[in-house]
Image: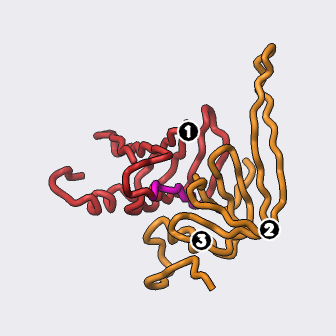
Chain colours: A orange, B red
Amino acid sequence: PMDAVDFCCCTNTVEEPLDLIRLSLDERIYVKMRNDRELRGRLHAYDQHLNMILGDVEETVTTVEIDEETYEELYKSTKRNIPMLFVRGDGVVLVAPPLRVG
Amino acid sequence: MSLRKQTPSDFLKQIIGRPVVVKLNSGVDYRGVLACLDGYMNIAIEQTEEYVNGQLKNKYGDAFLRGNNDLMGKSTTRKTLTLYSDGFFSFKMFL
């Protein structure tokens, strides 16, 4: 089996940013991607490139249309559900525990 | 804070715990307390707030911002890290 995560030693302290991600293994996380995409899913695996395996994912793609006459911004979001997903790390901008609304 | 000769890693240890603004060149700002930083410029921030023009989202707890892993130099998302410190100085690091 592929080792997605490589450790020198296991500690409970956060010493570097990737440790933060390690603490989120098997938890639901929020991922902000380039091109106005967001993912919410369970983190099964990750590596130093931020490639990730996410399970039970909801992807949200947000687009803005501008009405040519009123210049109103119309935000649209499209969602889809994906049971198991490989995320390529170069598209990842931010990783966090799931957002609380507010 | 001394600005005399010190290694980059000493510097990084000193700025941890300080409030920061990390501005991505996509125009989004992340404000919070710098929790840690690594050699790839991955950043962990606590009590992060995301600003796009006005305040859009609140992220509580830790947020991880991905650095540029391409060590050969080409950076895709450019960041500036602005540090507000004691009113004596502020400076930006271009990541």
Residue reaching furthest to the left: B5
Q: Are the numbered discs 3 and 2 placed on the same chain, yes or no?
A: yes
Q: As drawn, is B1 to the left or to the right of B18?
A: left
Q: Amino acid at mark 3?
A: Tyr
Q: Residue at x 71, y 68 (%)?
A: A54
Front residue of B66 and A13: B66
Q: Amino acid at mark 2?
A: Asp
Q: Tell which subunit mark 3 falls on.
A: A
Q: CA distance from mark 3 to mark 1?
A: 25 Å
Q: Position of residue A52 (x, y in %)?
A: 63, 67
Residue of label 3: A46
Q: Give the camera-side residue of B94 and A100.
A: B94
Q: Is disc 3 in the same subunit as disc 1?
A: no
Magenta span includes A91 = no
Q: Secondary structure at mark 1?
A: loop
Residue position marked by numbered label 1 in the rendering: B26
Q: Are marks 1 and 2 on the same chain?
A: no
Q: Mark 2: few, some, or many residues within 10 Å (few <14, many ≥20)?
A: some
* Circle 1 Cα neighbour tier, 10 Å, few/some/many (<14 / 14–19 / ≥20): few
Q: What segment is highlighted magenta in the picture? A: B62-69
Question: Chain letter of disc 1?
Answer: B
Give the image quarter of residue A35: top right
The alpha-carbon separation of the residues under discs 1 and 2 comes to: 29 Å
Label at residue A56: 2
Image coords of residue B11 (percent x, y): 28, 57
Amino acid type, label 1: Ser
* Whole-number angstrom distance, CA of label 3 to CA of label 2: 16 Å
**Local SS, label 2:** strand
* Helix, strand or loop for disc 3: strand
Task: Verify whether residue B68 appears in magenta.
Answer: yes
Q: Splitting the image into 4 quarters, where does residue B63 fall?
A: bottom right
